[in-house]
Amino acid sequence: MSSLPFQLKNPDLLHNLSYVNGEWVKSQSGKTFEVIDPGNGKPWISCPVNDASDVDVAVKHAQTAFESFKKISPRSRAEMLYKWDALIKENKDDLATLLVYETGKPRAEGYGEIAYATGFTWWFAGEAERIQGSVYQASQTDRRIFTIKQPIGVCAALVPWNFPIAMILRKVSAALAAGCAMIVKPSPETPITILALAHLAAQAGVPKGVISVLTTDLDKTPELSEALCKHPLVKKVTFTGSTRVGKLIAKQCADGLKKVTLELGGNCPFLIFNDANLDKALAQLAALKWRHAGQACITANRVYVQSGVFDKFVDMYIAQTKTLKIGHGSEDGTTLGPVTTTRGLDKADELVADAKKKGASILTGGQRANPTGLAKGGYFYEPTVITNTTADMLVLREENFSPICAFVKFETEREAVAAANDTSMGLASYCFTTNVNRLWRLFENLEAGMIGLNTGNSSAAESPFGGIKESGYGKESGKDVAVAEYMITKTGTFTLDEETD
C-alpha cells in the first residue's frame, strides 16, 4: 500500500483485510485478489479471497453479537447511527477519493453519492425509535390482541459496485435500526470503501460482530454468496444486482424460507411530451443518464419523445452531450468517467453493433474512447446517442449500464405507455408534461415501482425504493416499510376472566 496513487487525510481509514468480529483478518485460504482502477486499468491494492469455508465463523460471531445487540435500547442504536453519520461526513474527502479509484466515477459524483447515502444513516437513526407494535379491538369482548416487532436476526447484504456507499448505508442502517447484525459481501470491484465504512462504524461504537465484511473475487463470489444464503443462522438476505442473479439468490434462500429483499435490474423509460418544459427535461435526463457513465439501475435506458418536439429535443441533447469531458475521476473538470469493468465496454460494443445492424442511426459516439493525456487501459466509452431505434433492438430490450442513450419517437400517450411498459422489468419510470391530468394517468398506468413526475431524481431516504415485475420485491428506505424488512411481528392474544368479586 506504499505505492498508492493517492494520499488520504485520514490514513487509518484505509483497510484491505476482511472484517470479522471486530478484527481485520485474512481468508482461510490466504489468497488475495487485486482491485483495479477503471481509469487506467491498473491494480492499486489487494483484498482477501474469502470462500464458503470462511462463512461459518463469521456468521456465528454475528449471531453472538446479535444476541446482545438486539437488547440494546433503540435510542442507543440511534446514537450509534448518528455518530456513524457524523464520521462519514467528516471523512467525505477520503471516501470520495476511494470511490474515484474503485468505481471510476468523477470526484464530484463521489461527493454526491456520499451526500445521498448519509441521508440513510440520518433517516434510520430517527426510525430506530419509531418502531411500534399495535393493539387490535377484538371481535370477542373477553379477548385482547396486540403485536410486537422484533429484529429478525443475522442478515446478509450482497451489494453491487456502482454505488457502494449508498447501497451499504441504505441496507445496514435499516438493519442496525431494527437491532440486527449484518454480514456484507461487497462487489469485487469496490471492497475498500465498504471496509472504510466498517472502520468508521466501529469508531461510532457499533459493537464488534454487528457489522462484518467478507471480500472476495469474481470467481468465488457465487460460492461465498450461496454459503451466506444457505447458512441456517442467516435469517434475511438483501441483494441489489441483476435480475438473473436475483433469481438465483431467491432460489438459494427458498430452502430455508429466508426473508429476501431483491432490488434488481431496470430498463427504465423516460417520456417527454410535446407540452413538457424541455429545458427541465434536458437537465434532468442529462444528470440521470450520464451519472456514473450510465451505470445505475434507475438510469434512463429508453427515451420516448413525442413527435412534435422530437427533433428539437434530440438536438438539444446532443449539444449537451458534446459538453461532457471524459477523463479520470480524479481530474478537475471530468464530467464522464470510465465504466467500472471491461464487461461494461463489451456490453456497450454489443448494443451499438446490434443497433447499427438493425438500421439505427448513431448521432454521436458509438465506440470506445481514449481521452487525451490518459494512459491506455482505462475503460472509457464515448457518450452515445442513438435514434431510429426499433423495439427489436437490444438497446431497448436490455438494461445497458453504459453511456448509451436511445431515443424513440411516439405520437400518442397510449402508444408511449404501451412501449414504456413493454419490458419484463419495472423499477422506475419518468415522465415530463405540464398536463396535470396526464401526470396522474401516467402515475397510475406506468408499470414501475417508482415514478418520477417531472423529475429524474425520485430516490431519497424518506421514499420507499423498490420495483415490481422482474425488478424485484421488498422496499428499501421510506417510512416503516424498510425497517420492517428486518423485523418479525409477534401476535399476542389473551382472554380476560370475569370479575369474581
Image (tube, rainbow, N blue to C red):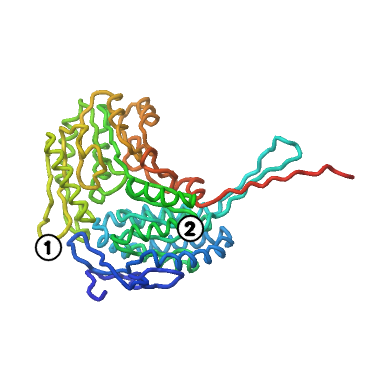
Residue 367, position as x, y percentages in the image: 12, 48
Task: Identify the image quadrant of residue 73.
Answer: bottom right
Q: Is residue 1 above or below residue 399?
A: below
On residue 384, the disc is: none
Vertical arrangement, residue 464 with respect to residue 237, above or below = above
Q: Residues within 10 Å of mark 1 (few under 14, many from 20)?
A: few
Q: Amino acid at mark 2?
A: Val
The kind of residue tagged 1 is Ala
Residue 127 coordinates in the image, percent (x, y): 51, 52
Give the residue displayed 11% in from the left and 37% down from the top.
357
Q: Badge 2 local density, few (<14 within 10 Å), some, or many (20+)?
A: many
Horizontal side of residue 72 vs 162, given as left or right: right
Which residue shows up at 39% across the image and 73% down it?
A: 25
**Image point (58%, 50%), residue name:** 149
**Relative to the observer, which residue lies in front, 234 or 44?**
234
Q: Which mark is residue 375?
A: 1
Task: Say which quarter of the image contains residue 101.
Answer: bottom left
Assign a secondary structure to mark 1. Answer: loop
Instruction: Please state, as top left, top right, bottom left or bottom right, where the N terminus lies in the image.
Output: bottom left
Screen quadrant of the C terminus: top right
371 relative to 6, above or below? above
Residue reaching furthest to the right: 501
Q: Earlier in the sequence, mark 2 or mark 1?
A: 2
Report the residue that reaches farthest toward the left.
372
Q: Residue furthest bottom?
A: 2
Along the viewing direction, whichever of 73 and 55 lies nearer the viewer: 55
Q: CA distance from mark 2 to mark 1?
A: 45 Å
Mark identifier at residue 234: 2
Say which of marks 2 and 1 sits in front: 2
422 vs 130, left or right, is left
Dot 2 falls on a residue whose secondary structure is: strand
**Residue 358 rendering spot, x and y as whole percentages:** 13, 35
